[in-house]
Image: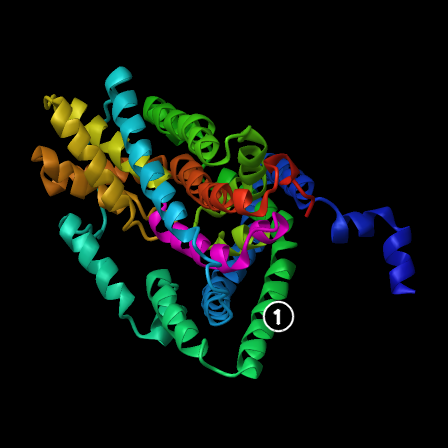
């Protein structure tokens, strides 16, 4: 009887089996309407968004640990040879994004009011400190790494365990694979809640922040979002075409729609890992590859963060009338790309790395932290767009290197959820 009801009732069928993208768009529109007509209900409705994001954050570390360990334990010889090209695309993409941001900052220079009051924030002291943090994250306690979503540590321990279990019995490998499939099923259940989560997030954000506070920094926002659009719609397609030698835009738009849309509202690359894993599964990519490349990308593939660091730093430079030559601009791009790899993968993670780039120009930490303060003011848009670019690009580059091996057309990569 329940099955008959499910198939006979179009509303129930749509909720259980309909396109999740369409449902998210409906949730987005509903959230805007509720925030506009009943802002007093935003706090209660916002609990849906908090529940959804927390559910993804909770399941993501376990998912990554088990999937990576299972993939490596059952690794077929020569099965993951595309990881190298994916990492290369990550590095090229992040550095290219920083260059785009530098060029745009010269063409459309922006300034800001550096009078923002700051709270207790602790930025890293330099690029070496960022790299040291990454290094120590590798040897973090495995339980602590999973509990605190330290994906560098999770990858390190899962890789070590997977290599050790390659010499284990077939029964052990089968058990690990069954566990990975079970957790993947749980993730798909959580992802079906995305429309309700987006509804709650949009309602709470618009009712709480609105857009009046953003008008004073419209120029910087337009510069940031413009750079991210150039990377998403020009740089990334060019890199994908370089790998696929065919029209890249079906793949680009699929990833923006099914990964970038959810990442935009969750504002966390880490929380979007399960969404990206699910998209890679629907694209029929190599599980041995994407189970490693997606969580790794959420840590080091940070084109959006590189843009944020560069644009905000250049805005401070223009405000203080500091001259910038070509060599220093290129050096800023390198520092921004390296610093972006140390972004935490959570909302606002790139902003505390701005002082690292500002130090190149002799800008004091006090002033640099005022720039960070401006970043938090516009963060409701900046961080959302940044995360959408970062997270969707993880799937774009993974697919670009995996699709040729599977001899699949990108145009086929737009399945319904």
Q: Residue 253 falls in which quadrant of the image?
A: top right
Which element type, helix, strand or loop, lies under badge 1?
Answer: helix
Q: Residue 335 falls in which quadrant of the image?
A: top left
Q: Residue 300 location in percent, x, y? A: 33, 49
Most foreground residue, 29 or 45:
29
Up the image or down, 267 lies above or below 99; here it is: below
Task: Tell whether 76 sits left or right of 349.
Answer: right
> Which quadrant does the N terminus fall into?
bottom right
Q: Residue at x 61, y 55 (%)?
A: 191
Most foreground residue, 31 or 333:
333
Up the image or down, 174 lies above or below 343; here it is: below
Most prominent secondary structure in the magenta stretch?
Answer: helix
Q: Residue 386 location in percent, x, y? A: 40, 38
Q: Residue at x 88, y 64 (%)?
A: 2
Q: Residue 234 location in percent, x, y? A: 44, 25
Up the image or down, 254 lies above or below 136; here it is: above
Task: Tell whether 193 sits left or right of 376.
Answer: right
The span shown in magenta is 279-301
- The answer to whether residue 326 shows anywhere in this view is yes
Q: Residue 162 location in percent, x, y? A: 43, 72
> On the image, numbered disc 1 is attached to which residue?
182
């Amino acid at each position: 009887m329940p099955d008959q009801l499910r198939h006979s009732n179009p509303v129930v069928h749509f909720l259980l089996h309909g396109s999740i993208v369409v449902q998210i768009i409906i949730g987005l529109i509903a959230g805007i309407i509720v925030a506009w007509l009943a802002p007093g209900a935003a706090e209660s409705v916002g609990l849906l968004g908090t529940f959804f994001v927390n559910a993804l954050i909770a399941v993501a570390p376990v998912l990554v640990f088990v999937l990576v360990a299972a993939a490596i334990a059952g690794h077929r010889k020569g099965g993951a040879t595309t990881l190298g090209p994916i990492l290369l695309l990550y590095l090229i993409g992040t550095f290219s994004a920083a260059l785009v941001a530098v060029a745009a900052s010269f063409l459309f220079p922006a300034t800001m009011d550096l009078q923002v009051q700051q709270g207790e924030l602790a930025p890293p002291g330099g690029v070496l400190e960022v790299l040291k943090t990454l290094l120590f994250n590798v040897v973090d306690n495995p339980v602590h790494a999973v509990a605190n979503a330290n994906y560098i540590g999770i990858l390190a321990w899962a890789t070590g365990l997977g290599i050790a279990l390659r010499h284990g019995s077939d029964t052990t490998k089968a058990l690990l694979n069954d566990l990975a499939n079970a957790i993947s099923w749980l993730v798909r259940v959580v992802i079906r809640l995305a429309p309700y989560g987006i509804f709650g997030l949009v309602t709470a954000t618009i009712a709480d922040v609105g857009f009046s506070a953003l008008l004073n920094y419209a120029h910087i926002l337009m510069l940031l979002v413009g750079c991210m659009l150039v990377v998403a719609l020009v740089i990334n397609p060019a890199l994908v075409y370089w790998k696929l030698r065919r029209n890249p835009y079906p793949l680009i738009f699929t990833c923006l729609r099914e990964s970038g849309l959810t990442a935009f509202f969750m504002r966390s690359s880490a929380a979007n890992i399960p969404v990206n894993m699910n998209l890679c599964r629907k694209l029929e990519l190599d599980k041995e590859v994407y189970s490693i490349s997606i969580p790794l990308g959420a840590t080091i593939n940070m084109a959006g963060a590189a843009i944020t660091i560069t644009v905000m730093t250049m805005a401070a430079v223009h405000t203080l009338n500091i001259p910038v030559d070509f060599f220093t601009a290129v050096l800023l791009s390198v520092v921004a790309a390296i610093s972006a790899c140390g972004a935490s993968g959570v909302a606002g993670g790139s902003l505390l790395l701005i002082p690292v780039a500002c130090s190149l120009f002799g800008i004091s930490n006090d002033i640099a932290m005022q720039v960070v303060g401006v970043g938090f003011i516009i963060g409701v848009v900046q961080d959302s767009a940044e995360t959408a670019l970062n997270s969707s690009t993880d799937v774009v580059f993974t697919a670009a290197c995996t699709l040729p091996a599977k001899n699949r057309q990108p145009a086929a990569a737009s399945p319904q959820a």
